[in-house]
Image (cartoon, helix red, strand yellow):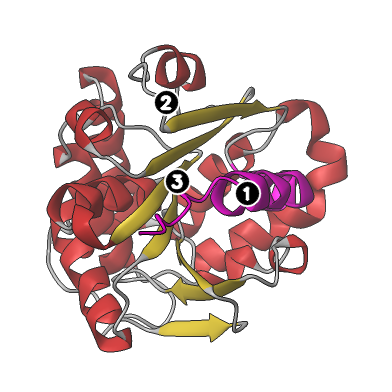
Amino acid sequence: MLNYIIEGNGQEDLVLLHGFMENLSIWDDMIPFLSDKFRLIKIDLPGFGKSEIVAEIQTSEIMADEVKKVIDELGLTEFHLLGHSLGGYISLAFAEKFPEVLKSFTLFFSTYFADDEAKKETRKKGLRIIKENLRAFVNAGVPNLFNPNEHDILEPKIKLAKEIAYGSSVDGVLASQKGMIERPDRTSVLENFEGRILVLSGKHDSAVNSEKTIKNLPDKTNIKSYILDCGHNGHWEKPEICASVLNTELLHHLPKKLIL
C-alpha cells in the first residue's frame, strides 16, 4: 500500500498526486488556501517519499493501479483527482481505467501528449546520469523548472525542491523515468471523460509545452484551462492562485443533483 496522509474533513474528497522526484509534502504551501470543504488525500507515489518501488519500469498504468488500491482502502466512490506533472500522467491513466469513480481530474502543470522523440532521447540520456550521480541530475534540472524571471525570489523554494529530490531513491527515479518514456498519447481520455476536467499550465514551463497543451484541448464544455505566470511548479510559485482556481472550478461548478 502506498503511503498517504489525510488532512481536513470536508465533504469533497480531493486526491493529490505529486510529480517526479517529489513527495506528498509539496502541497504544504497550497493547503492553507484550499477550501475547508475539501478532505485532502495526499499520496506518496511508488518509489518516492515513504512508498516502495513496485516495478523496474513504473508506467502510468502500473502507478494508477497502486493509487486505486489506496482509493479502495478508503472506500472512495466519488472524488476529485489532481496530479502534478508525473502525477498528471498517472491521473490520465486512472481516468482511462476507472472513470466511474471520478468527479473530476486536474492536469496540474502536466500534459496529455506523449513525449516526442527528442524528449524521449533526453530522458534516456538522463538515465545514465541518474545512476552515476543523482545529486548532479537534480542540480542540473530542478532550477530550470521554475520561472527564470523570478529565480531570486524563488530561491528558497528551489532549494526546497532540490532537498526533496535528493531524498528520492535512485531506483525509484529510474523506474519512473523509464515509465515516462513509454507513456502514450491520452488525448482520447479528454475526449471521452464525462466528468469535469481542469488544466493548469505555466507560461514559463520548460518541462511541458503549455501552449500546445492548451491549444489542442478538445472543445468541450466540461473542460476548463488556465495559464498562470509561472514555471512548472505552481504549487510553490503561485500557491494561493492555484488553490483559488481549484476552489472555484471544483467546488462552485459541481453538478447539481436532480430532484425527482
Please provide percent x and percent y for residue 60. Answer: 20, 52
Q: Earlier in the sequence, mark 1 or mark 2?
A: 2
- Kind of residue at disc 2: Thr
Tell me the crowding category of disc 3: few under 14, some 14 to 19, or many 20 or more residues within 10 angstroms, Cα based.
many
Left or right: 55, with 205 as reference point: left
Does residue 29 lie above or below 88 as drawn? below
- The stretch of residues the image draws in magenta is 233-260
- Per the model, the C-alpha gap separating discs 1 and 3 is 15 Å
Residue depicted at x 64% and y 33%: 231
Q: Nearer the viewer, mark 2 or mark 3?
A: 2
* Quarter residue 259 falls in: bottom left
Residue depicted at x 62% and y 58%: 161
* Quarter residue 85 falls in: top left
Q: Give the label on residue 27, or none.
A: none
Tell me the crowding category of disc 2: few under 14, some 14 to 19, or many 20 or more residues within 10 angstroms, Cα based.
few
Q: Nearer the viewer, mark 1 or mark 3?
A: 1
Of all residues, the one furthest to the front in this rendering is 260
Q: Main secondary structure of the magenta part?
A: helix
**Residue assigned mark 1:** 252
**Residue assigned mark 3:** 106
Quadrant showing the N terminus: bottom left
Does residue 184 lie above or below 72 as drawn? above
Q: Earlier in the sequence, mark 2 or mark 3?
A: 3
- Per the model, the C-alpha gap separating discs 1 and 2 is 15 Å
Badge 3 marks a residue whose secondary structure is strand
**Residue assigned mark 2:** 221
Please provide percent x and percent y for residue 194. Answer: 28, 40
Badge 2 marks a residue whose secondary structure is loop
Badge 1 marks a residue whose secondary structure is loop
